[in-house]
Image: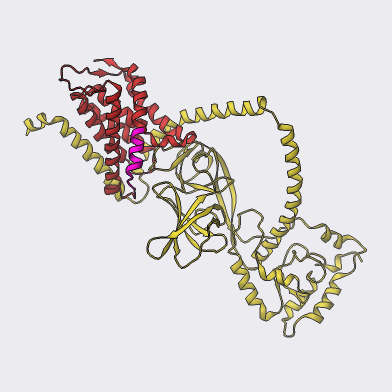
Chain colours: A red, B yellow
């Protein structure tokens, strides 16, 4: 599937109802916290990140994207025992980047979504790694094999999740 | 300037948001203690998520128990029979262990050994996790309302799980032992080498600070040492799986946790532990032979016999105290000598015996659980007939004839 370049007028901008905008990130956080207890491998997925990318791309607004990313990231941070802000910073960057890309590219098709998620997952992990090591002083190990494997897994899941979330989109 | 900001409005907002978060992080990192300022957002998020988790866990366990208790009962009769057989075997085993435990307590009491006992635990159900590979924590459905507090140890029947890092009203956060920020004082069961157990970024568990000149065998069990002042001594942590040369002068000892940390459902939180010298209780069970020896009129007067023997066999130069105590010894009259405290050949040997005994107290002790002591010298001396016993005020009557006057003749 090609990623087509579109002009600003051609791309469609979506919005979400208030309940959807609040509940979807909360449900993503809840599932992210709960499912790994039963299915341990699920911890390689990052549902909140997928939600950030989806909202950012659909709204096509950089401010909205970065604020959504910051909010979801901070909430995700608060479920961990680490200082609050590590996921926040990483998801803010991703939210801004995804919405910037969403303005320029048509990312409505599955192939584009997979590639987009693949790219932003690596960006997210890289920013997280930088912040965690540089600012917080956590000892993290960067493994390309692990990161790329996780990125592919998340990209495939994104194709499914985005299709489900498309139902909540409203034309702006 | 205004023009610049309006032109780069979005980027400016991005920088401002990032700067605010970096600033927040810096403040949190600077404070080494618990971040009280961030507690509120954590409480809110956990409070928002945990009701759903609790509801699902409750629903899931309800369905599960209904299925297992009322529907799926295939093979239950057979299992019941097998369990009954098992209970009978365990009863026999229990009698032996109680006896051994009593002996261990007497030895510990003699040596002034203080042991940590688990005096109160709270069972809790695991309802959530951080959902992140970088933060290995779980959430349990009990909190300060149930008596939980920060740094309470969390265990299962298999071994150590972690410790409470944050306790809210009805939910608590538990840091698992395989998280890289956790640390547990550990000791190897056989070699008695001590180290610090830590998690790795990959979620594995390694024992650090074991010198490379030491020998550690794979398969050896790792227990809590009690040195961290959080976990009581003697709880199983895991088993050594791999030993390799580590950084500097230390070994890299990889440990497989005794508890499956990725499949936790229910845990026990130790909310109260106390340190005390093991007391020999009067209510401790006696062996049938002891009771018989005290009550049956046909049993000969053993103390005199013992005293006479002790007189003849005790080493010269023995202290008067120990010779007097020989009147209450059981070493020469009973085939087993479990009811006596450390046995000494002579006063000269006593100090070395006790020292060895102290060293042997390093053996793993399950707090509050009957332990089999590993005191090699006592074993040897039990076979000796020239032994003298000095039990200091043991409340329980000695094995055969602690109070010969009271005995029916």
Nearest the eye: A13 or B33:
A13
Q: Does residue B148 appear left or right of residue B246 in this picture?
A: right
Nearest the eye: B365 or B74:
B74
Which quadrant would the C terminus of chain B be assigned to in this image? Answer: bottom right
Q: Which residues are magenta?
A: A139-152
Image location (x, y in percent) of residue B3:
6, 30
Q: Does residue B34 appear left or right of residue B289 in this picture?
A: left
Image location (x, y in percent) of residue B398:
78, 65
Residue located 34% across and 51% down the image: B32
- Say whether residue A141 is magenta: yes
Image location (x, y in percent) of residue B250:
42, 63
Residue located 80% across and 58% down the image: B287
* Residue B48 visible to the viewer: no
Image location (x, y in percent) of residue A86:
30, 41
Q: Residue furthest front?
A: A1
Q: Determine which quarter of the picture holds residue A55.
A: top left
Residue located 61% across and 66% down the image: B360
In the displayed structure, would residue B347 be above or below residue A171? below
Which quadrant would the N terminus of chain B be assigned to in this image? Answer: top left
Give the main secondary structure, helix, strand or loop, of the magenta stretch.
helix
Q: Does residue B310 appear left or right of residue B390 in this picture?
A: right
* Residue A61 visible to the viewer: yes
């Amino acid at each position: 599937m090609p990623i087509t370049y579109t002009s600003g007028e051609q791309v469609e901008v979506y919005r979400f109802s208030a309940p959807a905008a609040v509940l979807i990130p909360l449900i993503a956080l809840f599932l992210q916290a709960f499912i790994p207890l039963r299915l341990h491998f699920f911890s390689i997925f990052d549902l909140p990140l997928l939600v950030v990318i989806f909202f950012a791309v659909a709204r096509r607004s950089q401010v909205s994207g970065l604020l959504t990313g910051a909010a979801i990231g901070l909430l995700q941070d608060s479920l961990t025992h680490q200082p609050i802000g590590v996921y926040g910073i990483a998801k803010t960057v991703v939210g801004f980047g995804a919405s910037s890309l969403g303005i320029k590219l048509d990312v409505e098709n599955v192939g584009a979504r997979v590639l987009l998620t693949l790219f932003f997952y690596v960006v997210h992990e890289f920013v997280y790694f930088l912040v965690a090591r540089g600012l917080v002083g956590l000892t993290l190990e960067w493994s390309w094999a692990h990161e790329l494997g996780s990125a592919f897994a998340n990209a495939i899941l994104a194709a499914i999740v985005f299709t489900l979330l498309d139902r909540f989109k409203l034309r702006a | 300037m205004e023009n610049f900001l309006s032109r780069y409005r979005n980027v400016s907002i991005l920088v401002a948001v990032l700067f605010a978060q970096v600033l927040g992080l810096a403040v949190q990192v600077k404070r080494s203690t618990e971040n009280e300022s961030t507690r509120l957002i954590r409480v809110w998020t956990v409070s928002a998520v945990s009701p759903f988790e609790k509801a699902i866990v409750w629903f899931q366990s309800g369905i599960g128990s209904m299925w297992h208790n009322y529907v799926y009962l295939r093979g239950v009769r057979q299992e019941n029979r097998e369990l009954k057989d098992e209970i009978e075997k365990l009863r026999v085993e229990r009698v032996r262990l109680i006896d051994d435990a009593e002996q261990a307590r007497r030895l510990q009491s003699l040596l002034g050994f203080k042991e940590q006992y688990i005096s109160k635990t709270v069972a809790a159900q695991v309802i959530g996790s951080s959902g992140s590979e970088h933060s290995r924590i779980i959430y349990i459905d009990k909190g300060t309302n149930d008596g939980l507090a920060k740094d309470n140890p969390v265990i299962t029947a298999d071994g150590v799980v972690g410790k409470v890092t944050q306790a809210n009203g009805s939910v608590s956060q538990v840091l698992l032992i395989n998280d890289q920020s956790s640390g547990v004082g550990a000791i190897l069961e056989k070699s008695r080498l001590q180290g610090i157990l830590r998690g790795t970024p990959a979620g594995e568990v390694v024992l650090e600070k074991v010198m490379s000149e030491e020998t550690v065998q794979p398969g050896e069990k790792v227990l809590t040492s009690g040195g961290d002042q959080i976990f009581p001594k003697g709880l199983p942590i895991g088993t050594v799986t791999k030993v390799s040369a580590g950084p500097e002068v230390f070994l890299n000892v990889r440990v497989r946790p005794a508890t499956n940390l990725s499949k936790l459902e229910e845990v026990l939180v130790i909310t109260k532990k106390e340190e005390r010298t093991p007391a020999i209780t009067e209510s401790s069970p006696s062996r049938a032979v002891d009771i018989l020896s005290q009550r049956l009129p046909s049993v000969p007067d053993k103390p005199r016999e013992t005293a006479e023997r002790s007189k003849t066999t005790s080493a010269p130069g023995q202290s008067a105290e120990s010779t007097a105590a020989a009147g209450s010894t059981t070493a020469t009259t009973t085939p087993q000598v479990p009811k006596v405290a450390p046995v000494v050949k002579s006063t000269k040997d006593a100090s070395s015996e006790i020292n060895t005994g102290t060293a042997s107290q390093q053996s793993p002790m399950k707090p509050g659980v009957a332990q089999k002591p590993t005191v090699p010298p006592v074993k040897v001396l039990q076979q000796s007939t020239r032994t003298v016993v000095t039990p200091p005020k043991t409340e329980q009557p000695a094995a055969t004839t602690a109070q010969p006057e009271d005995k029916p003749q």
